[in-house]
Image (cartoon, rainbow, N blue to C red):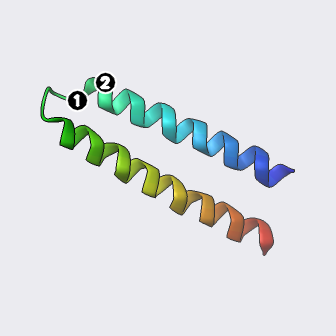
Amino acid sequence: MKLSYKAILMSLFVLSFSLGSIGCEKEGPAEQAGQTVDRTVEKTGDKMEDIKDAATK
């Protein structure tokens, strides 16, 4: 249960950061915003794996 709580908390943190970053980004092509979201999602996945690994050790 604690893993789920930590994972949800981390996901919300990363999501709020990514949305804030996109809002503050200078105007540019939609591709740049999409790339930012893609990178953020990838980092979130990496963090989730780290949390999972730490919980199983």
Residue positioned 22% across, 29% down in the render: 25
Q: Secondary structure at mark 1?
A: loop
Asked whether the residues under the numbered discs 2 and 1 touch, taking CB atoms below 8 Å apart as contact, a structural biologist would say yes
Crowding near the residue tagged with mark 2, few <14, some 14–19, many ≥20 C-alpha atoms within 10 Å: few
Amino acid type assigned to the residue bearing label 2 in the image = Gly
Q: Position of residue 4 (x, y in %)?
A: 77, 49
Residue positioned 16% across, 27% down in the render: 26
Q: Is residue 55 above or below residue 20?
A: below
Q: Residue furthest left?
A: 28
Residue positioned 40% across, 30% down in the render: 19
Crowding near the residue tagged with mark 1, few <14, some 14–19, many ≥20 C-alpha atoms within 10 Å: few
- According to the picture, the residue beneath numbered tag 2 turns out to be 23
- According to the picture, the residue beneath numbered tag 1 turns out to be 25
Spatial CA distance of label 2 from label 1 is: 6 Å
Q: Is residue 45 left or right of residue 52?
A: left
Q: Position of residue 35 (x, y in %)?
A: 27, 48
Image quadrant occupied by the C terminus? bottom right
Residue positioned 25% across, 38% down in the render: 33
**Of the numbered discs in the image, which one, if any, rests on residue 53?**
none
Q: Residue furthest bottom?
A: 57
Q: Is residue 14 above or below residue 1?
A: above
Q: Is residue 3 left or right of residue 29?
A: right
Q: Position of residue 49 (x, y in %)?
A: 61, 65
Q: Is residue 28 left or right of residue 2?
A: left
Q: Position of residue 2 (x, y in %)?
A: 83, 50
Amino acid type assigned to the residue bearing label 1 in the image = Glu
